[in-house]
Amino acid sequence: RKEVEQDPGPFNVPEGATVAFNCTYSNSASQSFFWYRQDCRKEPKLLMSVYSSGNEDGRFTAQLNRASQYISLLIRDSKLSDSATYLCVVLSGGYNKLIFGAGTRLAVHP
Amino acid sequence: ETGVTQSPTHLIKTRGQQVTLRCSSQSGHNTVSWYQQALGQGPQFIFQYYREEENGRGNFPPRFSGLQFPNYSSELNVNALELDDSALYLCASSSQKETQYFGPGTRLLVL
């Protein structure tokens, strides 16, 4: 079993749609959680950290359920510019090792 | 931009050759982590350097080695290249356990 698992996608949605990505992680001792965005042939960039209380950044909302070891990302009012691969990431304890899911590709069309 | 730079941007090698990839960390950061991203996969942790010492290693063979210099820049060396080493190699700099910022990557193709 992979340490971080995500919906494989791709998700093809029209502009204005709401889309949700899910992710599960296997290490219950994991402390920090993130969503990264990666554009085609570019490096991953931090989209947002994920906190137990849930957090929002504009059209983006992230949720964490520690009991279920489940992380989600909700994107409201999708824009063409949201088209990218979204990576669910967990920080492994001890040293600063990021464990990435395989990513979910989002394509927003007009 | 993150201020993390990598060189070269692209590289083509043949099986059995050796390669050195370079990373300059963001000013003020003392930690560099290296990741390998195969096509269609998420990045996989190779190793991390903190203040010139290896500070953790992923599931990669010893032919993957690295260095960190006093200015915190870093090198990734891969010996005896194999076809499966073809990937995007990413370095990320951070200040110890703070947020990691990725460089643009080096795309390596092994023929």
Image: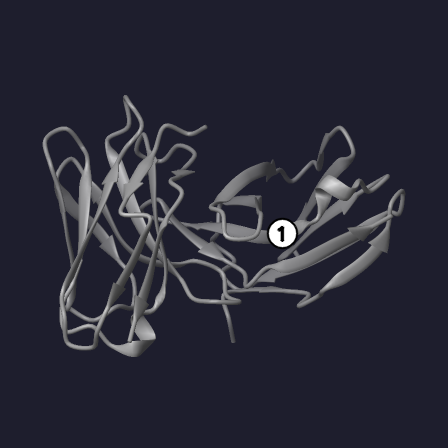
Residue at 17% x, 47% y is B75
Judging from the image, mark 1 belongs to the subunit labelled A
Residue A82, picture quadrant: top right
Residue in the image at 69% along x and 36% along y: A53
- Total marks in image: 1
Q: Is residue A23 left or right of residue B3?
A: right
Q: Is residue A110 visible?
A: yes
Write the residue at 19% across / 36% down: B73
> Where is B97 relative to A26, above or below?
above
Q: Is residue B45 above or below residue B4?
A: below
Q: Which residue is mark 1?
A: A86
User: Most extreme residue toward the top, as rendered?
Assistant: B28
Amino acid type indicated by mark 1: Tyr
Q: Position of residue A51 (x, y in %)?
A: 62, 38
Q: Taking the image as drawn, is residue A68 in sight?
A: no
Q: Which quarter of the figure has residue B80? A: bottom left
For the residue carrying disc 1, how many other residues have a C-alpha within 10 Å: few (<14), some (14-19), or many (20+)?
many
Secondary structure found at label 1: strand
